């Protein structure tokens, strides 16, 4: 029996690629489709957390999701060269 080591980087890339494909499809379909993509993706994340982790882990996992969303927003804002201020809340 062989034990396969989990490759977090590869898993993140795999998930990113799937979401990017769906994002590109929604983007080509218009604003309403994009809004459905964002809200449905957020809803799925929110509903997966209680199913996947113990109750005492809800808040730490949700905090991680929120932190990654804000990091992604900051990166996206910089990538498109938006002229706006973005304040990120950092947990200590």
Image (spheres, rainbow, N blue to C red):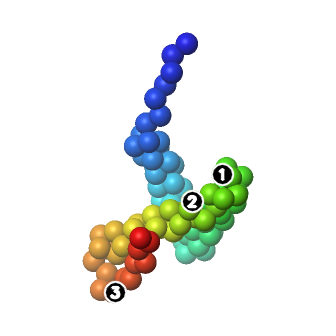
Residues at circles 3 and 1 in contact by the CB criterion of under 8 Å: no
Residue most toward the top?
A: 1
As drawn, 23 above or below 52: below
- Of residues 26 and 81, the one nearer the viewer is 81
Identify the residue at image location x=66%, y=51%: 53
As drawn, 31 above or below 14: below
Tag 3 secondary structure: loop
User: Which mark is nearer the camera, 3 or 2?
Assistant: 2
Residue most toward the bottom?
A: 84
Residue behind mark 2? 61
Residue behind mark 1? 53
Quick one: quadrant of the C terminus?
bottom left
Residue 48 falls in which quadrant of the image?
bottom right
Near mark 1 (Cα within 10 A), the count class, few <14, some 14-19 or many ≥20, is few
Q: Earlier in the sequence, mark 3 or mark 1?
A: 1
Residue 26 falls in which quadrant of the image?
bottom right
Identify the residue at image location x=36%, y=73%: 74
**Label for residue 85?**
3
As drawn, 8 above or below 47: above
Identify the residue at image location x=30%, y=86%: 83
Alpha-carbon span between mark 3 and mark 1: 34 Å
Q: Earlier in the sequence, mark 3 or mark 2?
A: 2
Q: Where is residue 4 in the image (x, y as percent from the top left)?
A: 49, 25
Quick one: quadrant of the N terminus?
top right
């Amino acid at each position: 029996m062989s034990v396969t080591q989990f490759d977090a980087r590869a898993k993140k890339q795999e998930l990113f690629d799937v979401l990017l494909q769906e994002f590109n499809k929604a983007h080509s379909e218009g604003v309403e489709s994009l809004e459905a993509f964002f809200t449905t993706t957020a809803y799925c994340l929110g509903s997966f957390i209680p199913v996947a982790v113990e109750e005492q882990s809800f808040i730490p996992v949700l905090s991680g999701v929120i932190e990654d969303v804000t990091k992604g927003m900051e990166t996206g804002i910089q990538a498109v060269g938006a002229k706006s201020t973005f304040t990120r809340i950092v947990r200590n």
